[in-house]
Image: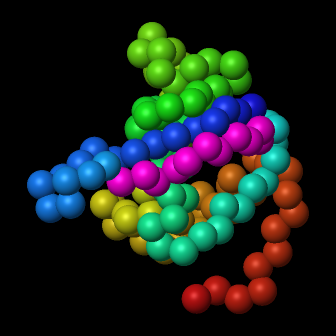
Amino acid sequence: MIETKDLVFSYPATEDDGAPTLAVNGVSLTLETGSFVVVLGHNGSGKSTLAKTFNGILLPSGGQVLIDGMDTQDPALLLAIRQRLGWCSKTQTIRLPPTWWKKMSLLALKIWGLKVQIFASV
């Protein structure tokens, strides 16, 4: 289970703007294990920042993130948290053939017990 309590994250001030940038402000949510969730928003609205707080890539400026009851701000728990929750960047640094991605996606769906039917292949 992923739980946030009054989660706040600000990026540090830069020389250009001189003020911290608030990216996530007061988010409280509970995501049950096995649920599917979609986070929607405009560019720069904090979607990726929120997701990066889930496995401790970014640590909250305020509030709390709990993964199966483990606090991401506890350095002793980060490895255990990251073994439960991965991060796949939206900008791929490794280019793999589309067939590999297709096979991995289908395997993930099969593991989750979902029926898969492919109508067309690009």
Main secondary structure type of the part rendered in magenta: strand
Residue at x 20% of width, y 60% of height: 17
Structure colour scheme: rainbow
Give percent across and percent down for residue 85: 58, 36
Q: Residue furthest front?
A: 18
Tell me if residue 22 is in the magenta stretch: yes
| Extent of the magenta region | 21-31
Residue plotted at (54% across, 74% down): 42
Left or right of 61 in this view: 103: right
Residue 90 lies in what quarter of the image? bottom left
Is residue 49 shown above or below 70? below
Q: Position of residue 108 (x, y in %)?
A: 69, 53
The answer to whether 44 appears left or right of 122 in the picture is: left
Say above or below: 46 vs 56.
below
Question: In what quadrant of the picture does the C terminus appear?
Answer: bottom right
Residue 85 in view in this figure: no
Seen in the picture, residue 57 relative to 87 is either above or below; the reply is above
Of all residues, the one furthest to the left in this rendering is: 15
Q: Quadrant where the N terminus lies? A: top right
Of 67 and 93, the residue lying toward us:
67
Q: Position of residue 76 (x, y in %)?
A: 45, 10
Q: Is residue 107 above or below residue 92?
A: above
Residue at image location 87% in from the left, 63% down from the top: 115
In this view of the protein, can residue 3 be seen by the observer?
yes
Figure quadrant of residue 59? top left
- Point out residue 106 in the picture as x, y percentages from the top left corner: 69, 62
Q: Residue at x 38, y 65 (%)?
A: 91
Residue placed most toward the observer, 106 or 53: 53
Q: Is residue 34 left or right of residue 58?
A: right
